[in-house]
Image (cartoon, grey):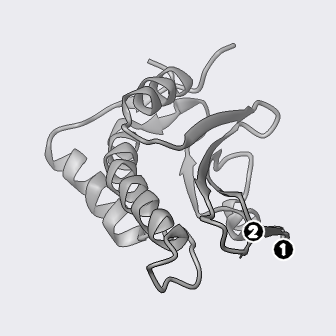
Amino acid sequence: MDMMTYFDQQIEALDFPGDINVNWDQEIRSFELEITMTGITNKMEIEDQEGDIKDDEVSYDDAILIYDETKVNGADYAENYVATIPFNGRQGLSKSVADGLFTYLKDWLADGMSDFMDFLDPKMTVDTFILEWQQDIFEQAVQDAVDAGVTGYLSYPKY
């Protein structure tokens, strides 16, 4: 199975009320998992990520970069993404990393959406919202996949 097919299947299986899109940049061999959460502001004035004031509906966007470490230096992009995850050229992405990622995403997105809804609830006293990546929990999910015997690689797509 290739990376793109795997991403599409895993995203479809997630129970996430927001949107997740995969953007594939063939030039630098990278994938961006773009996450969008949208909610009603409950007539509160909320400043969005661009600094605009919204009083009806607001969206929150963030993304994870999965990149070919033989073509790209992930550190050059780190400040633009909530997380950056390397893979090794045409060999692709380790299945244990992929499984760990989507295991972590399931809980991370559920918790993130709950926090986003709390932020939009006028009865709550949440001043800001941001998705916070917890690298140690992600790494533990990857290790759990390794411990469960997940091996092999998801190949880089050929098309």
On screen, residue 147 versus residue 84, left or right, reads left
Neighbour tally class for label 1: few under 14, some 14-19, many 20 plus, Cα within 10 Å: few
Disc 2 marks a residue whose amino acid type is Asp
Displayed quadrant of residue 46: bottom right
Cα distance, mark 2 to mark 1?
Answer: 5 Å
Disc 1 marks a residue whose amino acid type is Gly
Residue displayed at 52% across by 33% down: 92
Q: Nearer the viewer, residue 107 or 50?
A: 50
Is residue 71 depicted above or below 5 in this figure? below
Question: Where's residue 26, x and y in %?
Answer: 77, 30
Is residue 158 depicted above or below 65 in this figure? above
Q: Quadrant of the C terminus?
A: top right
On screen, residue 44 versus residue 155, left or right, reads right
Question: Where's residue 109, x and y in %?
Answer: 42, 54
Q: Nearer the viewer, residue 128 or 31?
A: 128
Is residue 153 depicted above or below 63 in this figure? above
Q: Are the residues at dot 2 and dot 1 in contact (C-beta closer than 8 Å)?
A: yes
Displayed quadrant of residue 154: top left
Per the image, label 1 sits on a secondary structure element best described as: loop
Neighbour tally class for label 2: few under 14, some 14-19, many 20 plus, Cα within 10 Å: some
Looking at the image, the residue that sits furthest to the left is 148
On screen, residue 68 versus residue 17, left or right, reads right
Is residue 130 depicted above or below 68 in this figure? below
Residue of label 2: 48
Identify the mark at residue 65; answer none if there is no mark.
none
Residue of label 1: 51
Per the image, label 2 sits on a secondary structure element best described as: loop
Residue displayed at 59% across by 48% down: 35
Residue displayed at 71% across by 59% down: 56
Q: Nearer the viewer, residue 27 or 46?
A: 46
Question: Where's residue 77, x and y in %?
Answer: 74, 62
